[in-house]
Amino acid sequence: LAKTTQPISMDSYEGQEVNITCSHNNIATNDYITWYQQFPSQGPRFIIQGYKTKVTNEVASLFIPADRKSSTLSLPRVSLSDTAVYYCLVAPSGYALNFGKGTSLLVTP
Amino acid sequence: DVKVTQSSRYLVKRTGEKVFLECVQDMDHENMFWYRQDPGLGLRLIYFSYDVKMKEKGDIPEGYSVSREKKERFSLILESASTNQTSMYLCASTLGTGVGEQYFGPGTRLTVT
């Protein structure tokens, strides 16, 4: 499985756009990039997934450059309820996932 | 609505006891997973299953076993609980084809005393 590196923590104010970058230099051709969100005392929740270029849904956008060695999760206009841990995962189709430690995002007023 | 349920939210057991953690999904998913989560260590994969009666070891299988007799149910077994198995245990499931998203249960916080 490709190893991922993401910041341990980030801080933001309400209303700002937050970008969390994940590095995955040894990503394989058949790997997908997936992001999850986890609130305290809950299981992780799927946010978004992509293979290349840009993917957008009602929650976030995922930017993947052509070389796919990194990806950026973009959360538009965060609110206090976006305070959570965000995990970047890279794995081939149907494979078990290595969640790692994630990025702890703190949003303050 | 997608649902993964776990038998208990909180569990307290004594050292040496045999512990069963049950996970049930109602989505007809083929793949099921057991993770544990500890502060500073993130989520670590214990075991997973791609089909009934099939199991594969994850990153930290020592001290654990699993059972999948029916498609919807995946059980994690601690044969002889130890204090270092005190943790939050999370079950997840996903469809067999494609990458798909993993759906997680609410977790079981197990304390072994």
Image: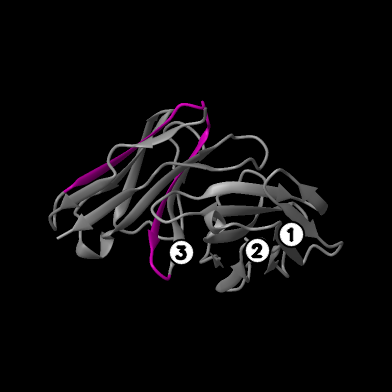
Q: Amino acid at mark 2?
A: Ala
Instruction: Identify the mark at residue A94; answer none if there is no mark.
Output: none
Q: Position of residue B7 (x, y in %)?
A: 29, 37
Q: Mark 1 or mark 3: which is in front?
A: 3
Q: Chain of mark 3?
A: B
Queried whether the magenta region covers residue B31, the answer comes back as: yes
Asked where in the image residue B99 lies, by quadrant, the reply is: top right
Q: Amino acid at mark 1?
A: Ala
In this rendering, is residue A60 above or below A25?
above
**Of marks 2 and 1, which one's residue comes earlier in the chain?**
2
Residue occupied by mark 2: A2
Q: Name the residue nearer the viewer: A82 or B58.
A: A82
**CA separation, marks 2 and 1?**
7 Å
Asked where in the image residue B55 lies, by quadrant, the reply is: top left
**CA separation, marks 1 and 3?**
23 Å
Instruction: Identify the mark at residue A28; answer none if there is no mark.
Output: 1
- Identify the residue at horizontal 20%, vertical 63% (top origin): B83
Q: Amino acid at mark 3?
A: Gly
**Start-end of magenta stretch:** B18-40
Specify the color scheme.
Answer: one colour
Q: Position of residue A82 (x, y in %)?
A: 56, 56
Residue occupied by mark 3: B42
Q: Chain of mark 1?
A: A
Tell me the quarter of the image containing the C terminus of chain A. bottom right
Q: Left of A56 or right of it: where is B101?
A: left
Q: Secondary structure at mark 2?
A: loop
Q: Position of residue A96 (x, y in %)?
A: 55, 50
Q: Secondary structure at mark 3?
A: strand
